[in-house]
Image (spheres, grey):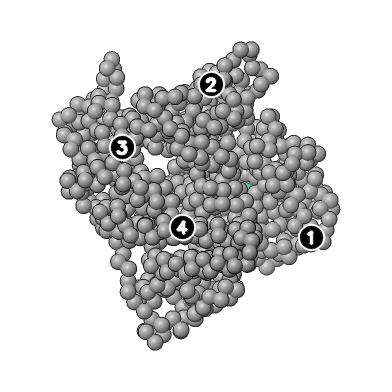
Amino acid sequence: MPELQLPNADASDFRKLADRLQALDIAYYRDAAPQATDAEYDLLRAEYDRLCDAAGIPEAQRYTRSVGDDHVTGFETVVHAQKMLSLEKAATRPEFLPPSGIDESVALVQAEPGWENGSAWGRLRAWAERISESISISVEDLDLVVEPKIDGMSVSLVYEGGRLVRAVTRGDGTRGDVVTAQVVASGAAPVTIAETRKFEVRGELYLPLEAFRELNQKLSSAGEKELANPRNACAGLMKRKDASSLAGTGIRSFLYFIPAGEHQMDLPASQADRLKWLSALGFQIHPDLATCKGIDAAYERCRTFVERRDGLDHEIDGMVVKLDDTSLHAELGSTEHHPRWGIAYKFPPERKPTLLRDISIQVGRTGALTPVAELDPVQLAGTTVSRASLHNRTHLERLDARIGDTVLVQKAGDIIPQVVGVDLSKRPAGLAPFAFPIACPECGSAIENRGRGQDEHGREIELWACINADSCPPQVEGRLEHFGCRKALDIEEMGAIVASALVRKGLVREVTDVFSLELATLGQLNLGTDTEPRTFGEKNAARLLEAARKARTAPFSRWIYSLGIHEVGDSVSKALATCHANFTELATSPLLTKIVERADLEARRKALGARTEQNKLRDEAAKAAGKAEQAQLKEQIQTLDRELSQVPSEVGPSAARSLLEFFRTPRGAKILADLSEIGISPATEQRRPTVGPLSGWVVVITGTLSKPREAFKTMLEEAGAKVTDSVSKKTTALLAGSEAGSKLDKAKTLGVRVLEESELEGLLDGR
Ligand code: IVH
C-alpha cells in the first residue's frame, strides 16, 4: 500500500484536490490498486465540491472522473442508449459523528451547528427541499422509496423477444463492456422472461458474502493473493474472458431501475410498482424496500437500517432514496452527473473500541513521520485489525491518544484502518501523554516541521519529517522501490524486500547505484536475517540487471516519474515529457520557470483585487493605481499564457516549483551528474510545438461532427493549436458540431468565438 499523501493545498486551492482525486481515480480504476478508502475518497470529493462552491466554480467545470472506467482490453464495447449516471451522495463528515460513530436522529443532528453541510441529514434535507420546490410538493408530503444501496458492479441488461440480448458494464458511463456471455454463464440474471417487448433494466451484479469467502479460500489454498472485498471480486470475475469458468461462482444481481430509454410500453408509474413488475418477471429485487412519506421518515429508515446490515448475505454501503412517482422523474431531469430524482445515503464507516498497546513511528519515502497505533486485534468489516494509522503528529496530539487508552478504530473501506477517537471514560489513572520523538526513529537524525498542510478533511496539520533525505534507510528504500515500480522503470525484481536489503547492506545509496550493481554480489544478497539467511540468487539477480539495462532507454516520462519528486506523479511526468527532451532541459526549464512566475503574478493580482475590493486603499488615486497595476498584471499573465499554450494543463505551479527546487538540491544535482556519467538516454517523447496556422490557439471541441473527435483533435494539433476539454476565458475558439449543449452556451456567455466545421477548414487552409 503506497503512502497516502495528504493534499497540502491552501484552502482556496481546489485544483490540487482535483489532481489528488484524479490520481486516486487512476489508482483505483486503471491500476486496480486503491490508494485511499472509499470514505476517504468521498471526503476528498466533498471537500473539493465545498471549495468549488465557495469559489463559484460551476459543476460543468469541475473535475469529473474520466478514468472511472471499468473497460477491459479485449471486451467489445457499446454505447449506452442512455448515459449511466451516478447518484448525488449524502454522508456525514467524521467530525460531525458522535463517538458511537452512527448517524443520529434529526433532532440531535440539528443541535450541532453546521449540520446543514456536515451531516448526511443536512444533505438529504437540502435535496428534498430542492425537488420539493421543483415539483411543488412539500418535503413532508413527498412519496419516497428507500432501497439498500448494493455495493456491487452496475450493469445494464437489455431484453428483447423474451431473451437477454445484451449485458453491458457501466464503463465510463457512456460506453461499457459487453458481458452478456459472463452474465448468462454465471446465472446472475434471468436469460428468458415472459415479457417479449424490448426494454432495458439496470441494477447491480454482486457476489454474496458466502461465495466471496469460498472464492478467497480457493485462492489462498492455491497460494494466490486473496481479494480485498466482494465488490472487487465480482468485478474481477466478470472480466474473465473465459465466460464458462463463471458457472458456479455464485454471482447474482439486484435490479432496481428502468431507464426511460427506448421501450414502448406502459410501465407502472411508481418505482415501488416497477420493482414489483420486475420481480413478477423473475428478476431479483431487494426485499428490503420501504415506502416513506416525507424526508424525515426516509432519513429515519436510512440511518436505522445500518443495524440490519450485518444480517444481510451481501454488502451494502448505504441506502438510496428515490422519488416514488416516476412520472416526475423526467420533469426533474438530471445534472451532467446525477439524476435529480434520487440521492444515495452513505453509512458512516464501522467503528470498534480496542486497547492501544503502543504507538510506533513509521518513516515514509519522503521522510514523513507517521504515527501508527499497535492495537489489541479487533474484528472490523470482515478482517482482523491490529495496526491503524494515526495519520500525523497533529492528529495524534488532537486525539491525545495515550498508550493504554481504549481507542475507537474505524475501517472505512477495506484498506487503511484509522484511530478516530479515545474513550476517556476507560482511561486508567496516571497515563502519560505520548511524547512524540525528537529524533528520527530510523536513523537518529533530527526531525523538522515541514510547515503546514491540510488533511483530507481540510483541517490544518503540521508536517513533520526526518531531515536526512540522503541516507535515512526507509527513505532511500522507499525511493528505490518507487524507482523500480511498474509505472516507473519497471524493474520487477526490485520490490520492497530486495530494495530494503540493497540499502541496508550498503549496495545502494542512491537510485542511480542500481546501474553499477554486479551479478556476483547481487546474487549473494541476503534477503533474510543473519540467523535465517535467504539469498536472492543468481537467476533473480540476472533478471534484475537485465531489467535495469532495459530501463536505461525507458521513455523519458517514466524516468521523470521514477525520481519520486514531490507533486510529480504519473500524469504530470507524461505531460512534462511532451515538452522537454531530457533531464538537462527539464532541470533548467524556462517553461517551468514561467509557470511559477505566472502563479506568482496571479496570486499578486488576486491579493491586489481583494484589497481594492475591500476598499483598503482609501483614496481614489490609490484605488486607480491599484486597478492599473491589476490590469498590468493581467496583461503579463496573458502574455505568459500565450507562451505556455503548448504546455499540457497537468503541469501546475506546485509541480513546476517542486521540480525546479529538486534539481537545485545537492541530491538532485548528484542524480543529474550520475545520469550523464552512466550515459542514461531515455527515449524522448517530446512533441515539438507545431508552428502552424493555429499556433497559440486553445480550442474546445463539442457536439456531433462529420468525423470522430480524435480526427479533429489531430488536425487542430497539427495546425499548432492546443485542444482542451472545457471552455474558459483562455479558450480561443469552440469547434461546435450539431447538438452542442452546455459548452456552446458557455462559449456564448464568455464571448468565445464559435467555429463551424466549414470555417475550420478555411482556417486550416490559411484562408
Ligand atoms: S438507482 C442514476 N438504486 O449506486 C443511477 N443505484 O451512484 C440509478 N446502486 O451507480 C441508480 N444500489 O450502481 C440505484 N438500489 C439502488 C442501488 C444503486 C446500488 C449503485 C448504482 C449507482 C450508485 C450510485
For badge 4, the amino acid type reads Ala
**Distance of mark 2 from mark 1, alpha carbons?**
53 Å
Taking the image as drawn, is residue 207 in sight?
no
Q: Which is more foreground, mark 2 or mark 4? A: 4
Residue that appears at 61% across and 38% down:
315
| Residue at (73, 53) in percent of width and height | 127
* Residue at which label 4 appears: 599
Indicate the amino acid at tag 3: Leu
Residue 375 drawn at (x, y percent) = 53, 21
* Mark nearer the N terminus (1 vs 4): 1
Q: Please tell me the numbered disc located at residue 480.
A: 3
Q: CA distance from mark 3 to mark 2?
A: 32 Å
Cα distance in 3D space between marks 3 and 1:
58 Å
Q: Which residue is mark 2?
A: 434
Residue 557 x, y percent position in the rendering: 32, 53
Q: In the rendered structure, are the residues bearing label 2 and label 4 in contact, judged by CB atoms less than 8 Å apart?
A: no
Q: Which of these two is toward me, 379 or 600?
A: 600
- Residue 133 is labelled as 1
| Residues under numbered marks 2 and 1 in contact, where contact means CB atoms less than 8 Å apart | no
Q: Give the distance between the C-alpha atoms of the residues marked 1 and 4, in whole angstroms.
A: 42 Å
Q: Residues within 10 Å of mark 4 (few under 14, many from 20)?
A: some
Left or right of 341, for residue 468: left
Which mark is first along the chain, 1 or 3?
1
Image quadrant where residue 287 sits: top right
Tell me the element at label 4: helix
